[in-house]
Amino acid sequence: MASSEGFLTDGQRELLKIASQNAENLSSSPKSPSSLLSDHHVKAPAGGKSQTSGIAVRHVRRSHSGKYGKVKKDGAGGKGTWGKLLDTDIDSHIDRNDPNYDSGEEPYQLVGTTVADPLDEFKKAVVSIIEEYFSNGDVELASSDLRELGSSEYYPYFIKRLVSMAMDRHDKEKEMASVLLSALYADVISPAQIRDGFFMLIESSDDLAVDILDAVDILALFLARAVVDDILPPAFLARARKALPESSKGVQVIQTAEKSYLSAPHHAELVERRWGGSTHITVEEVKKKIGDLLREYVDSGDTLEACRCIRELGVSFFHHEVVKRALILAMEIRSAEPLMLKLLKEAAEEGLVSSSQMVKGFSRLAESLDDLALDIPSAKALFQSFVPKAISEGWLDASLTKPATEDGEIQEDEKVRKYKKESVTIIHEYFLSDDIPELIRSLEDLGAPEYNPIFLKKLITLAMDRKNREKEMASVLLSALHIEIFSTEDIVNGFVLLLESAEDTALDILDASNELALFLARAVIDDVLAPLNLEEIGSRLPPKCSGSETVRMARSLIAARHAGERLLRCWGGGTGWAVEDAKDKIMKLLEEYESGGVVSEACQCIRDLGMPFFNHEVVKKALIMAMEKKNDHMLDLLQECFSEGLITINQMTKGFTRIKDGLDDLALDIPNAKEKFGFYVEHAQSKGWLLPLFDSPATDA
């Protein structure tokens, strides 16, 4: 008798009974009896007929799991079986929300990394050492830093970098470079390495002459000075000349050194005094003079005379040595302590010894306390008594009291120090390449946005000690950084740091106050800062300090007639003109080219703009015009600019990126903008215009 619709047949009941028994015996079976039915597609009979076809009730080979499946050879089993020993399920999924989740079960992923070139690392590190030496003149510190750096096999590159950096600076730095080489000779750098370093310099004369107009004469003077200082033998010149092509500028360098400097009467005195700086005396001589004047002061007690002698030394960047030696003398001669502290207080109040030099003197002594305690057992206790007294009297910055023994503080100081070194390298590369996108990428790679104000301070400080070109580049870079990654707060904090140290900066840069005022005023004109930000900066400075005066000067510059035009050209032209003016010129040259102009003329017009950092605007406007005019003629111009190196891959990528970012707005005026842009991106990628990291936009289907 057929069952009604929805009831099981006898055969199906038998199958269900067997499955249930198996499920009870093996409670860990992964599937329930109901799922067993679904695996075999068993349905309730419809229309009063039994639907058992396709199910072999008899002679069914079943697994112990209650599942239907054929058993494979070697016991691995088929579908629904347990599988063979140590079988693993390749489709298993790790659930991180499972209470028994173990992170060790996660699959390993090998991550590739690039191996840093030791020479590149060395070159980056020595730039920071040289910069610091140029700022403080401490030969001992530069020597110890170079030793700690290790990699002595690369010392010739240090010589090359030291001299090449000094060549593009003032006479003071050139003199300092020669003094440092004399101090390092034989003690740190071997005579053979000195010779190799100078030969590398002579070999690169042609390249140096591209950036430094009088490179041949300056390098010849360095060569002559090295011979006079006995760190190069005279025979070196003849041997080097034989190894160089006759047509090279290196030969001119050697000839100039021999004929113009080393053959002249009294040439030794002439060469030594050529750069006219006070640093022609060695550091050892300066230390001896400092020691003599301090002992004389102990005998006489004349503070005014001692201050006059310190001033006459003319080594403001080395006053930390005065501080250190005065404190050591106070420890050695206990009766001299009141006199020494009085001298340091007087020197600080007169502005003779800057706050940074005072702190540095105390810090250097703190670092050498362990060694000093061998000769003066009470050195540590005495130093601990000097510090609070100096702070309470107002001639030592309270920052010295921060506990430097805690691990967190040490790590923080080390992080800041490392950031400053990296920043200096990045800024120098920017001054050479004028590549703003590359600088921004390097800054982002550092991954320390909290130190943006420190970067701004470094940028402007380095630019102030250079030519107008670098000052202009620094102002232009500030505008770009404000648009890309710097907040207004970062800019404000950076200028506050600059102005707080304005008095120290003025010791090395005579016109520092005026130049800082120009940087501040230019930032307002470029919309990097608002006029109200000047009020905020001024409120965070002491009322009668040099920084406050600089802020007032900046306000006067902004209030003057035609201030905008004057400040945009304050560094002598070049890139100092309004961005809107640049955009107008770019638009006009593109329109002229589109109406039948010649590619070479358009390229020359772009070159005449003199704004390589702004060429991304050319790319952007060219692409928009191509979309509007439905004329791909503009791609030919971009191809020519790229082939000539007129528009770099970074600028090209930035131009495409700016279009991509504004594509939604552009589509309101040009309906097929996304489609056209997708075509342009494909074309650009096929021609190699874009960086590999550029992401193509998702075009509508």
Image (tube, rainbow, N blue to C red):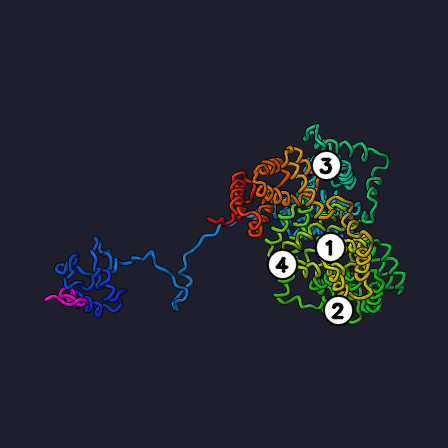
Q: Is residue 424 above or below residue 344?
A: above
**Does the magenta stretch mainly form a helix, a strand or a loop?**
loop
Residue 336: which quarter of the image? bottom right
Task: Give 679 or 490, whichever is nearer the viewer.
Answer: 679
Q: In this view, does 3 lie to the left or right of 329?
A: left
Residue 87: which quarter of the image? bottom left
Q: Decide: few, some or many residues near mark 1? Use Cα within 10 Å; few <14, some 14-19, many ≥20.
A: many
What SS does tag 3 mark? helix
Tell me, for residue 449, which label it has, or none: 4
Task: Name the residue that disc number 3 marks.
Answer: 209
Q: Which amino acid does label 2 sit on?
A: Val
Task: Give 152 or 130, whichever is nearer the viewer.
Answer: 130
Label 1 to label 3, Cα distance in Å?
A: 33 Å
Task: Name the residue that disc number 1 marks.
Answer: 523
Q: What residue type is labelled 4?
A: Pro
- Do callouts 4 and 1 mark residues in contact (Cβ within 8 Å)? no
- Do callouts 3 and 2 mark residues in contact (Cβ within 8 Å)? no
Task: Name the residue that disc number 2 marks.
Answer: 387
- Most extreme residue toward the top is 246
Check if residue 538 falls in the magenta segment: no
Q: Decide: few, some or many residues near mark 4? Use Cα within 10 Å; few <14, some 14-19, many ≥20.
A: some
Q: Is residue 283 left or right of residue 488?
A: right
Which residues are drawn in magenta?
A: 1-14
Q: Tell which circle, 4 or 2, labels the residue nearer the N-terminal end.
A: 2
What SS does tag 2 mark? helix
Q: Tell which circle, 4 or 1, labels the residue nearer the N-terminal end.
A: 4
